[in-house]
Image: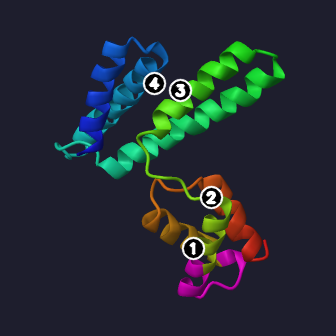
Amino acid sequence: MSLRAQLNDALKEAMKAKDQVRLDAVRMAIAEMKKRDIEARATGNMAGISDADLQGAIQKMIASRKDSIAMYEKGGRADLVAKEQAEIAALEAFLPKQLDAAAIEAAAQAEIAAAGASSIKDMGKVMGAMKAKYTGQMDLGLASATVKRLLGG
């Protein structure tokens, strides 16, 4: 089942269950998908964005919410922290299982070896390979920091 279909099904389920937080999160994901579809059509891609592109968009939405959580925690807004955390949980349901720090490190070591990377100058090549191979499965910030550390940067 495509990610589009999963989002549409989740929208219907959230409406039936009257789960407002999940409903809001799914609606935002669908709105982002439609926005990106329109942008894709402008470049001649009439089919719209792929599931991988949609997963990337959902990851950006999650990252944005994590940033918001940090700000809300500083401001003492526990109610908003809880809402953002619930939205993150709802959005994560549409992504493949995320790699943990140990798995990201193992993947980084494998890609560094495969690329023959030896210095920080090779970081772009390694990160490009990791993004292609593990799309939607890892926190890119953590992966980038791991690759940088392993390359001695």
Residue tagged 2: 100
Q: Amino acid at mark 4?
A: Ala
**Alpha carbon distance from label 1 to label 4:** 33 Å
Q: First in sequence: mark 1 or mark 3? A: 3
Q: In this view, which residue lies farthest toward the front? A: 17
Q: Nearer the viewer, residue 130 or 85?
A: 85
Residue tagged 4: 25
Left or right, 29 with respect to 38, comes to right
87 to 51, vertically: above or below: above
Q: First in sequence: mark 2 or mark 3? A: 3
**Residue 66 appears at what percent x and percent y?**
65, 34
Residue tagged 3: 87
Q: First in sequence: mark 1 or mark 4? A: 4
Quadrant of the rendered structure where residue 24 is? Answer: top left
Q: Amino acid at mark 1?
A: Val
Residue tagged 1: 126
Q: Quadrant of the N terminus?
A: top left
